[in-house]
Image: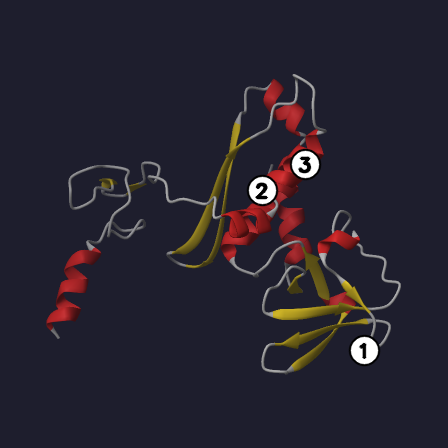
Amino acid sequence: VKAVTKKICKDLNENFLCPLYSDVMEVILPPDDDDENGDENENENGKKEGGGGVSNVNLICQDGSTFSIPKSDCVLLPIVHSTVEELSIYCWGKIVKALDAELLLSRGIHTMEVTCSEAMGQEAVFRMEIPNMSDGGKDMHEEIDQICDVRSYIQRGEVFPKPCLPMKNDKGIVKTSSGESGSCGLRCPHCGFNLEKLLDKIKEG
């Protein structure tokens, strides 16, 4: 698991993460581009060819600003926004595929959770059951691709808040102001500090 995760992170590290499905930018790829990211090179992914040289990825923003970035410095991702929320979904699929979903299921591993963090206390968690294709039907990789289709979550509004898993720190299980443990509330997940008191102080001036 560590080796697979390290490789996926290394592929993303020190590169410009280009969201191919961006709803605020027009992404123009080099003509006759052969994408190096495997499943991200299909026409239905919304890539547009033409303009701006043979080795650069060109971005046109809503305000008309343009950016030209060497393709060798870009990782073309099937996401809408380069946020930790969407990256966690993307990484979940890459990790499950690399580890072999069927092997994981045969060893009794039925669910995997991926956490992507951009700063202390700013992280996103994607948790999903590993698809079981033993009853036939779709190809395993096709099913994983469907699960990791970021656009489907955004367009259909299928992402709903769920209770957090129990969290522990050096003081024990984190509890909310209602006394429930392991559920969502205004408490820091790292130190258990009551954020409601801080908000009250801010409102008081």
Q: Position of residue 202 (x, y in %)?
A: 17, 70
Name the residue rendered at 69%, 23% in the picture.
137
Closer-to-camera residue (26/55): 26
Check if mark 1's residue and mark 3's residue have beta carbons within 8 Å.
Answer: no
* Secondary structure beneath label 2: helix
Report the residue marked by disc 2: 92
Q: Earlier in the sequence, mark 1 or mark 2?
A: 1
Rendered image coloring scheme: secondary structure
Which element is circle 1 on? loop
**Three-letter code, disc 1:** Gly
Residue 74, horizontal then vertical, whole percent: 71, 65
Please provide percent x and percent y for residue 160. Answer: 41, 44
Vertical relation: 52 (above or below) 172 = below
Res 52 label: 1
Which residue corresponds to the image point at 72% horizontal and 54% vertical from the top-left?
45
Q: Quadrant of the C terminus?
A: bottom left
Q: Are marks 1 and 2 in contact (CB under 8 Å)?
A: no
For the residues bearing labels 2 and 3, Cβ distance under 8 angstroms: no
Tell me the CA gap for discs 1 and 3: 34 Å
Q: Residues within 10 Å of mark 1 (few under 14, many from 20)?
A: some
Residue situated furthest front in the rendering: 156
